Amino acid sequence: MDYVKSRVRDVNDFPKKGILFKDLTTAFKDPRALHAIGWDLSQLYRDKGVTKVVGIESRGFIGGSILAFELGAGFVPVRKPGKLPADTLKATYEKEYGTDTIEIHRDAITEDDIVVLHDDVLATGGTMAAAYNLVKSMNPKKIYVNFIIELTALNGRDVLPAEAEVTSLIKY
Ligand code: AMP
């Protein structure tokens, strides 16, 4: 992971002043780093019987798709409101300013599924906690939670349910 870490770009004051943005596009465009991300993510879940990877819009679609492909699982998108065409379940959650909503197709997950929820970066954890509750309401057998990067100083793990098994490849 040291190589992947060396390919992550820090962008100051994005998307707003005071945020140090961990930009993974510089790792995704690097063939060796992209391969290492896909391989290391898949090694975490190789023997767990995972049937669906749920990726969070939009940066979670990249690692999530690779992980699903590597595991022989299906891929399910969690999207911003109004983007999914069929019947959805919605979750609204608090952000620093105001609220945000995410959606998942109502028929995306069944009670037989073993799910990995994936996003690129764990920051405050609000987005993932909302996605976790959405997936949980569909009663899958098991939900794992995964990130490529975890910003430990923001304590995002604390807002995720205690039962969630959380992994991340790179911690800052
Ligand atoms: P969260 O605060 O955990 O709900 O994060 C919201 C979304 O913004 C997640 O999809 C993260 O990938 C992204 N995000 C938040 N903070 C950062 C950061 N400092 N660098 C990169 N991505 C971030």
Image: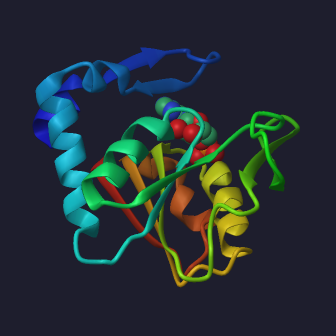
Residue 36 in view of the camera: yes
- State whether residue 40 is above or below residue 21: below
Give the residue at x 23% y 77%: 47
Give the residue at x 48% y 25%: 20
- State whether residue 3 is above or below residue 43: above
Q: How is the image coloured?
A: rainbow
Residue 150 in view of the camera: no
Give the residue at x 81% y 38%: 81
Q: Along the line of sight, which residue is nearer the eye, 43 or 98? A: 43
- Measured from the top left, where is residue 112 in percent x and y? 54, 82
Ligand 1 shown in quarter? top right
- Asked if residue 2 lies left or right of residue 170, the reply is left
- Asked if residue 154 lies left or right of residue 9, the reply is right
Task: Name the quadrant containing residue 130.
Answer: bottom right
Q: Quadrant of the N terminus?
A: top left
- Measured from the top left, where is residue 161 in percent x and y? 61, 74
- State whether residue 100 is above or below residue 31: below
- State whether residue 86 is above or below residue 49: above
